[in-house]
Image (cartoon, rainbow, N blue to C red):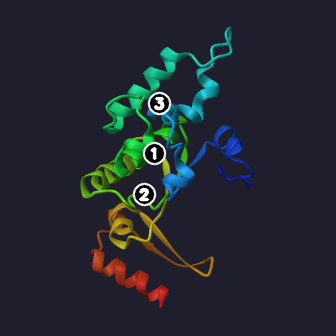
């Protein structure tokens, strides 16, 4: 990272030292605390920053402000910050997974299968968030997706893996001006 070798050992170190976040493909098993409220799910990566130094407890005003900011910024439909995440749609759950790492201000965000199990409207919103993170915020996004059109549409550079090795590289549709069919053909070449 920045020219230095990095060994990623723990989630805490990844976030604190290297500012790397990970949005899991399995939000229900690995990405969310389903029975906890929206607010806790949004802010748990930054609880340490929200602790009042005198009381040593999370400052509820700051936590609510941060939670409200991310709900508004990503258009999360949750009704209330106290609602359990389990009650939300798949798209809103996925936005919470993204917002959690945005709150942590990660420079590198690994997003695994970002739109699995979400409706078309949420899919486009999530795609726009990913585009904005890269273009406006200057974040590095490592997108892992089996959805070829999604990958072609979002990626500037696509690395093709087979048997845990990089077997090819294609400039993505966002940067190359190539058609989706041309990019798909090039990727297919390395997969066969």
Image coords of residue 150 (percent x, y): 35, 65
The kind of secondary structure element at disc 1 is: helix
Residue topped by disc 1 = 98
Pick the residue in front: 176 or 71.
71
Which residue is drawn at the image coordinates 40% and 63% (left, top)? 155
Give the crowd class for mark 1: few <14, some 14-19, many >=20 residues within 10 Å. Answer: many
Image marks 2 and 3: residues in contact by CB distance under 8 Å: no
Q: Position of residue 147 (x, y in %)?
A: 38, 70
Residue 19 visible to the viewer:
yes
User: Which numbered tag is attached to residue 160?
Assistant: none
Which label number is shown at residue 39? 3
Gap between marks 2 and 1 measured at Cα: 9 Å
For the residues labelled 2 and 3, the Cα–Cα distance comes to 21 Å
Residue positioned 61% across, 42% down in the render:
19
Residue most toward the top?
Answer: 54
Residue pointed to by mark 2: 114
Q: Are marks 2 and 1 in contact (CB under 8 Å)?
A: yes
CA–CA distance between discs 3 and 1?
Answer: 14 Å
Counting residues from the start of the chain, the first of labels 2 and 1 encountered is 1
Of tags 2 and 3, the one toward the viewer is: 3
Mark 2 falls on what kind of element? loop
Instruction: Tell whether 85 sits left or right of 124.
Output: right
Q: Quadrant of residue 172?
A: bottom left
**Tag 3 secondary structure:** helix
Q: Position of residue 190 (x, y in %)?
A: 48, 86
Please provide percent x and percent y for residue 98.
45, 45
Relative to 144, say whether 79 is above or below: above
């Amino acid at each position: 990272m920045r020219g230095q070798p990095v060994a990623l050992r723990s989630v805490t170190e990844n976030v604190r030292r290297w500012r790397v976040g990970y949005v899991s493909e399995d939000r229900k098993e690995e990405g969310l605390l389903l029975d906890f409220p929206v607010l806790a799910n949004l802010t748990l990566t930054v609880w340490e920053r929200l602790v009042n130094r005198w009381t040593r407890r999370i400052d509820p005003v700051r936590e609510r402000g941060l939670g409200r900011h991310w709900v508004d910024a990503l258009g999360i439909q949750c009704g209330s910050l106290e609602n359990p995440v389990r009650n939300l749609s798949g798209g809103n759950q996925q936005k919470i997974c993204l917002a959690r790492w945005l709150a942590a201000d990660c420079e590198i965000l690994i997003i695994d299968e970002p739109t699995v199990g979400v409706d078309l409207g949420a899919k486009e919103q999530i795609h726009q968030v990913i585009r904005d993170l890269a273009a406006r915020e200057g974040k590095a996004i490592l997108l892992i997706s089996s959805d070829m059109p999604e990958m072609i549409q979002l990626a500037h550079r696509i690395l093709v893996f087979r048997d845990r090795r990089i077997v090819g590289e294609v400039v993505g549709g966002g940067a190359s001006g190539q058609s989706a069919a041309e990019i798909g053909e090039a990727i297919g070449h390395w997969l066969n």
